[in-house]
Image: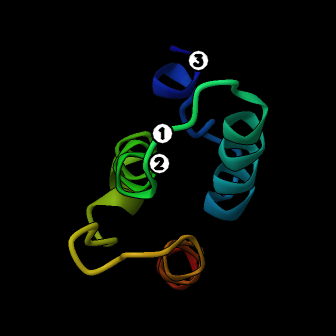
């Protein structure tokens, strides 16, 4: 439940949000699939960043971090 409600804060970089979300995910006793995790992280990015980060092309954590960083720059 916390994972679905953990969203990017207005002053937070996409990388910081993704790292914070990932850290929270690692603390959960019930593990979710990587695809579900990718979808949740994507859904919880700020809209102006998520618009430019295509989840269908982003299949790994590192790829998501890279794409989000590029969009912010």
**Residue 67 x/y as whole percent:** 48, 81
The local secondary structure at tag 3 comes to: helix
**Residue 53 x/y as whole percent:** 34, 71
What residue is drawn where x is 46% and y is 48%?
A: 37
In the picture, measured across the screen, residue 29 lies left or right of residue 68, that is right
Q: Quadrant of the C terminus?
A: bottom right
Q: Which residue is tagged 2?
A: 41
The correct choice, above or below, for 40 with respect to 49 in the image is above
What residue is drawn where x is 59% and y is 26%?
A: 30
First in sequence: mark 3 or mark 2? Answer: 3
Q: Which residue is tagged 1?
A: 32
Q: Which residue is tagged 3?
A: 2
Residue ranking furthest to the left = 56
What residue is drawn where x is 26% and y is 72%?
A: 54
In-front residue for pair 1/9:
1
First in sequence: mark 1 or mark 3? Answer: 3
The local secondary structure at tag 2 comes to: helix
What residue is drawn where x is 21% and y is 72%?
A: 56
């Amino acid at each position: 439940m916390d994972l679905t409600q953990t969203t990017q804060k207005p002053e937070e970089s996409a990388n910081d949000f993704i790292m914070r979300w990932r850290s929270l995910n690692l603390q959960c006793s019930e593990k979710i699939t990587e695809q579900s995790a990718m979808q949740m992280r994507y859904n919880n990015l700020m809209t102006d960043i998520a618009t430019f980060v295509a989840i269908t092309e982003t299949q790994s954590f590192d790829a998501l971090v890279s794409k989000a960083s590029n969009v912010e720059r």
